[in-house]
Amino acid sequence: MEIRVVQGRPLDGAADLVVIGMFRDARRPLEDADRTFDGELSKLISREGFEGKLGQTLVFPTFGKLPAKKFAVIGLGEKKSFTPDAARKLGGFLVKLAMSNRATTLATSLPGAGVNGMDSRTAAQALAEGFFLSAYRFHVYHGTLRKKETPPRELKTVSIYVTANAAKSAEEGIRTAEILSTATNYARDLVNTPSSEMTPARMAEEARAMVGNGIRVKVMDANEMERRGMCAALAVARGSVHAPVGVHLSYRPAGAKRTVAIVGKAVTFDSGGLSIKPAKGMETMKIDMAGAAAVLGLFKALAELRLPVAVHGVFLAVENMPSGTAYRPGDIIRAMNGTTIEILNTDAEGRVTLADALSYAASLKPDMIVDLATLTGACVVALGEEVAGLMSTDPKLSRRLRDAADESGEPLWELPLFPSYFDHIRSKIADIKNTGNGSAGTITAALFLKQFVGDTPWAHLDIAGPSYTERETRPDQPYGGTGYGVRLLVRFLQQLRR
Ligand code: BES
Ligand code: MN
Ligand code: ZN
């Protein structure tokens, strides 16, 4: 899909579909269109009970009165609630509208510039993100059956009409949106690809493909991981025929004042291991590398954005399988930082692999560490599927992440690293054990991780809920992997230089 900026009135656009937005509480932009249709438009609006709720539409043929084939009015909701997130949703509704009208070209105005302090760059970026993210489909695996059905018409060209003084900033916003959405859609592809393909080796290949453009990649095989003492991650990997791989990406621009390490959980399939999951619980466990997918997505964007911040991306890719060689409940293993871990449940494997990934990240001496992990079902119980859990040792870091999440529209909510719950994971015969007593499961998992970051300011994002959707709660999140975290991390890094 191509999105371009055009100066002028969308009404003059020769597209399959021309769309004008209408706020619930400000109908003025429609006056022009109303005149074109000799006042019939406003009559139709009141007759149809069109109120201007966000995403509500009214579509009709232009009968030759406009260069376009069809004309639509789309509701923008109340002016005061028109935020970048509303603009992003609007982009999604417009993709759906184009599809259902079989339009391949669409012309629209740029609503939102000047509303609630939004500038035209922000408005254009949000709207364009909505377009790019909503148009995503994963059809690599559609076979002959699917191909027989009529293929849906794809929206190919979107023209966003702006005033002359907004053109340049709108262009910039759209360009940024394209970089961020491409990176997000790439992360979605990684998550959607079945575990039979998305093995640890494949994840390393994906990382290697990033080399260049200021990005360097170091890949560690099992031997090197062993030499470095990454016995916790190796233990999890032991049940699988797929060898584990360690990945360290780095982006170190000259003059960078800060260094951030981003760590992702990279379990390419989580069967639970010997503490095997019930069939239902395993159905979606190809998504258990979504944290690492966000790291890879971030690096895809970093190569293009030239941010003046140094970034390390770290993940240890493993598959968690039951077998004669698998690690067992009762085993005690020593992580890279010397902490000993008593395994009680092999399904609490994420924290075990992250023990080494975080130790490694801390050894790089970054100014801060942020990890993303599909870590606990408990987080989905607590916060649902749309919100990630945030836990941090550093209030300033957590504030920055919450601000970034507000801007990017990837919700997260902070939970306390309540210190006395550490008692739940104290082991009698090792330093710590890998499960608590079942209560506060998200927090005890985070307290486990905290053991491995040393004094480095650290934040943990439990993304078990929002990394995947089967319900499509928003138009810009189609079925499957959501790419949660990519846009949030970019905004977080952008803020760091301020
Ligand atoms: N990968 C799962 C967590 C998960 C569950 C992610 C649902 C996405 C959706 C993780 O490895 C896991 O199995 N956690 C266990 C921990 C328990 C054994 C302490 C869980 O949440 O049940
Ligand atoms: Mn598990
Ligand atoms: Zn897992």
Image (spheres, rainbow, N blue to C red):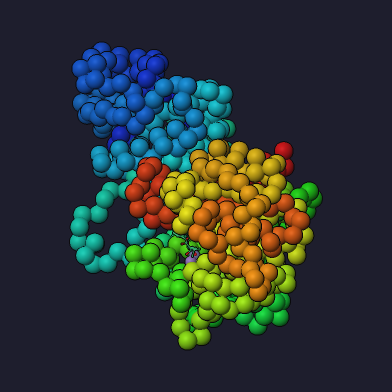
* Residue visible at 47% across and 86% down in the picture: 324
* Residue visible at 76% across and 50% down in the picture: 258
The percent position of residue 214, horizontal first and vertical second, equals 69, 59
* Residue visible at 28% across and 48% down in the picture: 153
Q: Quadrant of residue 285?
A: bottom left
The percent position of residue 333, horizontal first and vertical second, equals 64, 77
From this view, report whether residue 141 is shown above or below residue 69: below
Determine whether, in the image, residue 127 is placed left or right of residue 496.
Answer: left
Counting labels gives 0
Outermost residue, bottom side:
324
| Residue 204 vs residue 415, the one in the foreground | 415
The percent position of residue 357, horizontal first and vertical second, equals 64, 66
From this view, report whether residue 347 is shown above or below residue 417: below
Determine whether, in the image, residue 329 is placed left or right of residue 496.
Answer: left
| Residue 225 vs residue 329, the one in the foreground | 329
* Residue visible at 51% across and 81% down in the picture: 326
From this view, report whether residue 327 is shown above or below residue 175: below
| Residue 193 vs residue 232, the one in the foreground | 232
Q: Split into 4 quadrants, where in the image is the C terminus?
A: top right
The percent position of residue 101, horizontal first and vertical second, equals 25, 39
Residue 374 shows in the view: no
Residue 396 shows in the view: yes
| Residue 375 vs residue 418, the one in the foreground | 418
From this view, report whether residue 189 is shown above or below residue 487: below
Determine whether, in the image, residue 162 is placed left or right of residue 16.
Answer: right
Determine whether, in the image, residue 70 is placed left or right of residue 363.
Answer: left
